Image: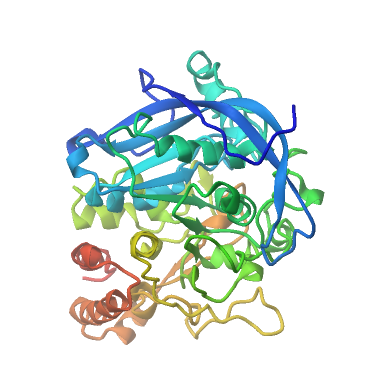
Amino acid sequence: MTKTSDRLTDPVWSGPQGGQPVIVLGSFDLGPHGYVAEEWWIDGTARSWQGSGDLGDDGHWNTKVESTCPFRTRIVVCRPDNAERFNGTTVVEWLNVSGGGDGSPDWFFLHRHLMRQGSAWVGVSAQKAGIDGGGFFESGMHLKAVDPARYGVLSHPGDAFAFDIFSQTGKALRTDDGPLAGFLSETLLAVGESQSAMFLVTYVNAVDHHDQVYDGYLIHGRGSSGVSLDAQMLSTENNPTEGGVSVDSLESAVSLFTGRQRIRADVRVPVMTVQSETDLVMMAGIRGRQADSERSCWWEIAGAAHFDTYGLIASQQDDGSLSPAELALLMRPVDEVFEMKATGLINSGPQQHYVLNAALAHLEEWARNGTPPPHAPHIENDTEDELVLLRDDFGIAKGGLRTPWVDVPVAVLSGQASEGEAFLPLFGSTHPFDEARLEELYPGGRSQYLEKFETRLDEAIEGGFILQADRAEILSVAASAYPMS
């Protein structure tokens, strides 16, 4: 490794590669929707960063290049098959490696919106675990394990270099002969959930002002802080490289997350942070909570979990052609996912999917035209214990970004869950109302429920938290999902 300047170097790209890329984008075919998926290699010399002065929770991190190392990673590009359909926005997702391979959770939540808008999506293998294994769980799903012949050519120097790999990918996407040749982006937006969101917090605070590649950031489901510049994410006492991470209780989960890092006040471009109840409590994200500002907006979705039945199940089949009854069935509450049995029903509220559609639309408008998103109140919490959310008589969180699923409920939706193995505690809970409670709330039955639901939905749309484009589908799914005839 050698010393170098702070300058972002020019990456080299090759592709598209033949054959089928290893990534889960759903069980549906992109072709009938006018989209193609391509895989490219990105080569370059990546930089790692070191801090200069105090790296405090205010996010004002002064950094300089520490060292350099060569890399070759892959990206997956999903784009319209015709440049005339491209709307000029490319969403670049920092792929999530918590499961031991490259995951694309924000593609799952956002793909319907992206495809109807004509946007491009790019998934970046920014972290080493997605290529070579390691991380929280050694699942054997990293690229070199799944297809060693295809991915043996990749080389990742370690996650301290992940920030620069993400920068160089964005730079490649800006070129007129690169992976998006003919689809040059007017707006380049970075997104990431969970572990990826925490890396993006650090990227925004420590790297963005140097490289100035992206036009906006959607940070989804972050913990209390970003990661360190050497890519340590959790408490050193619970280092995931030493036997894995245990989240078998709320206390053990919270102990993994330390700090109170906020987005820097002088951030260069718009940053939207979208949090579920799980992110606020189990990942202690409430400690990083901040007020809205000129270029920073923070939403907290009442009743939402870190992941839910839409993201886990329905998104895999939801290409826009499903009937409301089919979509409602796929989003029903279940107690088993990935062959893991939960102690109760996991969160089945679809509000996160629809709110994220609105958040991305606002971020795009903010980045392009300077129009900020609407302000949303924070979820109410106990003044003595900030990690305790206040709840109404049903058990539904008070305050926050409200949707009809919590204001016209048929169940208690929560981001907090019973204990369970692996990722199960992140999936929240659903406690359906019994028949007596439903009759008490909606004595007129389904029609009364739908009337109230529609009124509250229109208020959420008027407030800017749900898109008008999703209205008809939401009403139809609500009618199909109502538990009583």
- Residue 250, given in percent of the width and then of the height, sits at 67, 62
Q: Is residue 287 visible?
A: yes
In this view, the residue in front, 16 or 171, is 171
> Height in image: 31 above or below 199?
above
Instruction: Work out which quarter of the rendered image holds the C terminus and state it.
Output: bottom left
- Residue 429, given in percent of the width and then of the height, sits at 50, 63
Give the number of marks.
0
In this view, the residue in front, 72 or 30, is 72
Q: Is residue 416 visible?
A: no
Please indicate whether residue 302 sits to the left or right of residue 265 in the image. Answer: left
In this view, the residue in front, 344 or 307, is 307
Please indicate whether residue 328 sits to the left or right of residue 285 in the image. Answer: left
The residue that appears at 60% across and 80% down in the rendered structure is 381
The residue that appears at 54% across and 40% down in the rendered structure is 166
Instruction: Name the quadrant containing residue 457.
Output: bottom left
- Residue 123, given in percent of the width and then of the height, sits at 44, 39
